[in-house]
Image (spheres, grey):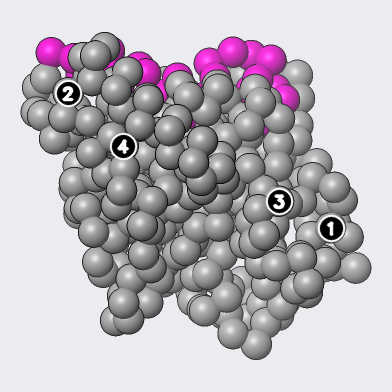
Amino acid sequence: MKGAARHFSGSYGEARGKFLAAARSAGAAIRHHLHPLKGPGGEELATDIARFGPENARHVLGIGSGTHGVEGYCGSGVQTALITEGFAASLPDDTAILFVHAINPYGFAWDRRVNEDNVDLNRNFVDHTMPHPENPGYEELADAINPPDLSPETMAECRARMKAYAAAHGPRAMQHALSAGQYTHPQGVQFGGRAPVWSNRTLRAIIRAEMAAAERIAFVDIHSGLGARGAAEIICTEPESSAAYKRMTAWWGSSVRSTVGGGSISSDVPGSIPVCFAEELKGREVTACGLEFGTVPIAEVTVALQSDNWLHQNGGRKNPKAAEIGKLIRDAFYVDADDWKEQVTETTYLTCARALAGLTA
């Protein structure tokens, strides 16, 4: 989408300002869910809602950003572009669009993928009253995934251990160990938490408040960091035999991949956002997916996550390496180039247009 780059931002504060200004200008109903903490400049943090269409709509399309904090640079820019370019200006009857901006505002503002509790939100939607999912591969590699320092020698040793694990168990097992989440190392990468965190509770409240009258719901959660630069995959967390997967492929075709059975670029992750929609909207037709955009090679993403986690166990923004690592993590999940921004905006526009058509068919 030509000109889309102007809707993207260089900070959470700028992104929130652009999103809210676009929503007001377009006549959206706006609601704010304020976070208890502040941003690095003392700024207010919030998950903001921009709603278009009737409050009691039977068909609702939700478009989310910032589930993984720093990925909000991508998602927020796309949301603002869609609003500004009139995507929600002329809706089918009995239909609403709900833009959910910065689902994890703390991570977005502080340039982290995780939240204020070091929790990966997309691993947090599990039943915390039951035993947590186990990840034995992570346990075996925990000190390689979470290196004690970032020296070239230590990082090389960690890579060697992970390569050896992949050689012994296969690349999918290595990916699962690294990215499928864990519930035993609160200071480690990919921690899923031990209770529902603020963003989990807030999103559930938003679903109950904004989708109470809906019978057919679709939710497109914008993500970045997996896959080739600018390439898109629609990630389904249900098996290919499910009704949701069949709806997704009817709407979006071959770009849909299921994490169940290993067909997706993503691991089969417990506790992701689609679980939340299924639980809160029992008895409704729910089609919830992740829309994933590629950025840089996965090895670079892994190093960025390791470095960011190390930084925040070693002084955070007071550490002399803070600026260097902050850029590393942002670059892993956000390509600050006009062609990439235009590509992800155009793909999201088409994806959401097809979701609207599917919802109202």
311 in the magenta segment: no
Residue 103 in the figure: left or right of residue 266: left
With respect to residue 223, does 34 lie above or below? Answer: below
Mark linked to residue 145: 4
Give the mark, 3 or 4, whose residue is nearer the N terminus: 4
Label 2 to label 3: alpha-carbon separation = 34 Å
| Dot label at residue 249 | 1
**Considering the image in quadrants, where does the N terminus appear?**
top right
User: Contact, CB < 8 Å: mark 4 with mark 2?
Assistant: no
Q: Position of residue 293 (x, y in %)?
A: 63, 34
- Residue 262 appears in view: yes
Label at residue 149: 2
Looking at numbered disc 1 in the image, what kind of residue is underneath it? Thr
> Against 258, is 77 above or below?
above
Report the span colored magenta. Answer: 320-345
SS of the residue under disc 3? loop
Which residue is nearer to you in this view: 22 or 361? 361
Residue under label 3, please give it.
Answer: 263
Q: Residue at x 9, y 28 (%)?
A: 315
